[in-house]
Image: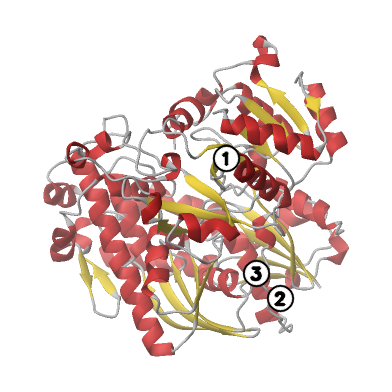
Amino acid sequence: MVILGISAFYHDSAVALLQDGEIIAAAQEERFSRKKHDARFPRHALEYCLRAGKIPWSKIDFVVFYDKPFLKFERLLETYLAFAPRGFRSFRLAMPIWLREKLFLKDLLLRELKAHGGDDFDASRLLFTEHHVSHAASAFFPSPFEEAAILTMDGVGEWTTTSLAMGRGNDLQVTKELHFPHSLGLLYSAFTYYLGFKVNSGEYKVMGLAPYGTPRYTQLIYDHILDLKPDGTFRLNLDYFNYCTGLTMTNDKFDALLGGPARDPEVWLEQKHMDLAASLQAVTEEVVLRLTDSIAAETGAANLCLAGGVALNCVANGKVLKRGRFKNIWIQPASGDAGGAVGAALAGYYIHCNQPRKPQPGDAMRGSFLGPEFAQTDIEQRLRTIGAKFIVLEEKTLIQRCARELSEGLTFGWFQGRMEFGPRALGARSVIGDARSPKMQSILNLKVKFRESFRPFAPAVLREDVANWFELDTDSPYMLLVADVKKERQRAMTEQEKNLFGIEKLNVPRSEIPAVTHVDYSARVQTVHRDTNPIFYSLLSEFRALTGCPVLVNTSFNVRGEPIVCTPEDAFRCFMGTELDALVVGRCYLRKQDQEGALKAEYHQKFDLD
């Protein structure tokens, strides 16, 4: 049985291909179109998935869309009626798009599917599942658990913003929901907007900014904005928000409460902004911890699965793990809307078609390496065509050379195997550097990524060594858990350093691996496993043999505002538009100094800032 899952038309369009319950391929449209968070119908991702699975249209049994547009339209209408006439302007702007496209989404999808080769594709093979069911299915069905509680949290689906479901075998039942407009995701997005970052894009920046601040606004949020109950359920005070009726997230009353208007994105960050980020993060963590505590007490579940955009808050995830209310936790690596494509396909297979399920050891996401890959001969031809100068090395020689040059402080673009599905680079489309270097964070932020200096980087560490370097001894293959660096690896701060505030803290080395140690001694850990990424594992092993350190900086291979690179051509253009020292694509090794100067460009200016 072959099933396609599709998410589209809101943000982060994607396609996933399922064959007899196995996830064969999955990719986001942005990686092909080169438009960040591309929301259009995922034509290129669809073509890739069918090509990867060698599946003709005639063999597709069902296509499943990740939410139900009529229910969303119902929410739009009811919200307008509830707030009329205040919401008329946003209603007037939204209505033409809904009437032209989204309300008649079934017809639009059928037209798109037929246009891509499915001329005989009939409406009976097109299914729709609810948004949070897609999230829950993406979390539970690929997990290694026979039974689990499933918590999904995001901005909003049709009506649901937070849901609890129970998964057993091939069955998934939603048991509790919180509904719009009361949303933890929208609360986080509102503060993201107020702090001058893009909604649905910059929330992770707020999380990264939080450790620079003090949570001195936490009580003010509880007193005026968020009514939090002991079991983690909550209500927002809508007097402070504008997302129900207007074109912005917050309003004048929100501004007055926090002492001024929203930050202009180009204005320098102040201590107040850091304190607000810290306060929001503290509130978010408390909500998540109360929810998971009550779920553990109510269900008695040993296992917990997480999905939805809030599940990308790896700091909160790490605290749930540390709390110890669940024996095991598994988080969908593509927890946002893109992962809804995987969840839709899985819901179609297990729930609609009632197919048997047998959980796999580890999980069924294949390390999240579900995107395109390129044969060595194809890589060489593509690089020659665009004028790249390279040498081809045997794998062992390549690994040895890269490990040595990394230890000497060189920065690398690293392109191997199948592209990752989800927002994290996991060693297939990565930029890597020496985690021991006190200068590496600044170099990568300012000269490679062209992004804000406060942004932290993640460590990639061999799984067998993780407990020797971090306060963590469990798998974290998808970079979705935060843990502290081991005490014995930390560097004590001087009294003078302790008195620094905000961004002044940035350049103070805090451990033996300062490039991946955040200002609060934490790190967003990725454990690297031999079975899912053997060549990256080999590189880390060689680096450990050479330096005694099994940790490298791992960040996504792109510049600010650009989707992660997909093809060898993407990788070379990004390499030539940044100050990366070297690039590895398959077994092709490239040094910047060997390339034609005319191929260099002001590359990062081609992309809108995120």
Q: Marks 1 and 2: which is nearer the front? A: 1
Query: Does residue 30 sit above or below 570 in this rendering?
Result: below
Instruction: Tell me the kind of residue under disc 2.
Output: Tyr
Q: Quadrant of residue 564?
A: top right
- Residue marked by disc 2: 349
Measuring from the top left, give residue 232's x and y in whole percent: 30, 75
Q: Which mark is residue 363?
A: 3
Separation (CA) of disc 1 from disc 2: 48 Å
Task: State the residue at coordinates (45%, 79%).
Answer: 326
Instruction: Tell me the kind of residue under disc 1.
Output: Thr
Residue 333 placement, left or right of 492: right
Measuring from the top left, give residue 372's x and y in whole percent: 74, 47
Q: Residues within 10 Å of mark 1 (few under 14, many from 20)?
A: some
SS type, badge 3: loop
Q: Residues within 10 Å of mark 3 (few under 14, many from 20)?
A: some
Task: State the residue at coordinates (62%, 22%).
Answer: 576
Colour scheme of this structure image?
secondary structure
Please tell me which of labels 3 and 2 falls first in the chain: 2
